[in-house]
Image: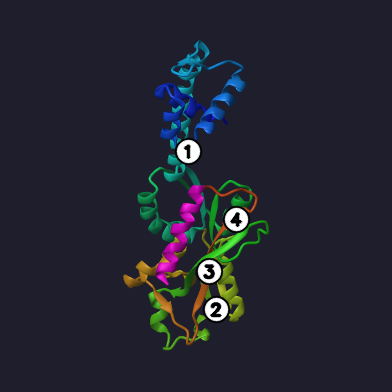
Amino acid sequence: MYIEALQTFVTVVEEKNFTRAGEKLLLSQPSVSLHIKNLESEFQTKLFDRSPKHLNITPSGKILYERAKQILKLYTKTKEEIYDYYKTIKGTLKIGASYTIGEYVLPALLPEFHEKYPDIELEINIDNTENISKSVRLLQNDIGLIEGRTNEKDLDIHPFMEDEMVIVVPERYYRQWHKPVTFEDLQDLTWIAREKGSGTRVYMDHILRSYGIRTKQLITISSNHGVKEAVINGVGASILSLWVVKDAIQNHQLNIVHLKDLNFTRMFSYVLSPHIEHTKAAEAFLEILTKKESHKN
């Protein structure tokens, strides 16, 4: 580009002198002369009539002078706009979140994110882990926040937070058991489970199978709130994230079953497609997401 040459030309016209123009631009006189020579070659016209005492601009030079000022002004404005674009992150960010994260974890992150990046518009879709993972693979969401693992192979998976899982039961179950509670107390109960494809359902199936817990009946409800309310109302037991049942425990609506020397945890992860370049908006969100967990630890 001839931006530097145009700037030199405009300065020569306004200073009416090659030497003064060079001093103002911190250029040597040969450099100033070379810029003018290159412009005259580019436009195939003479820009100045020179004499030992005078420097006069030609008619062609006057045309270029007016256009050069416009070009330089537009160039400066473009640079400023590009700088502002990267300084002030804008755009739309599509986030897919599994139910536990979308209903309980994500809302706690939004105030800080919105305050720091008010020009980013968020579109949040809440679904089960399987569907969220699929949506990221199909590029329908920029970021996916999921519980546990995913069967989708073509994704980058990054754990960002540990989640405590708890066995919860109605008050009437808990009152009739001898303490401490054992796995024998958990046999042949009605269990309330999330739907297949849910990370919470995968974890619950794993615990029941790993510890040989027999179920009398299995009831499936496709929302955390529905499962929790069923337990509160005495329908049966369940395994849910502590995020989901924290308020109900504090309000003495249900009980956590504590089994000796056993803690149940899983990881929350964010998933990204490796086939697209991630936007500044996505990077900004992930910075806050991972910072929250590092501060927590």
Residue at 53% in and 17% down: 47
Residue at 47% in and 62% down: 290
Q: Nearer the viewer, mark 3 or mark 1?
A: 1
Which is more N-terminal, label 1 or label 3?
Answer: 1
**Residue type, label 4:** Ser
Q: Nearer the viewer, mark 3 or mark 2?
A: 3
Label 1: which secondary element: helix
- Quadrant position of the C terminus in the picture: bottom left
Which one is in front, 92 or 238? 92
Instruction: Report if residue 289 lies within the magenta region.
Output: yes
> Magenta residues?
280-297
In the displayed structure, 142 sits above or below 238; it is: above
Q: Which residue is mark 4?
A: 133
**Residue type, label 1:** Ile
| Quarter holding residue 251 | bottom left
Which label number is shown at residue 267? 3
Q: Which residue is mark 1?
A: 82
Label 4: which secondary element: helix
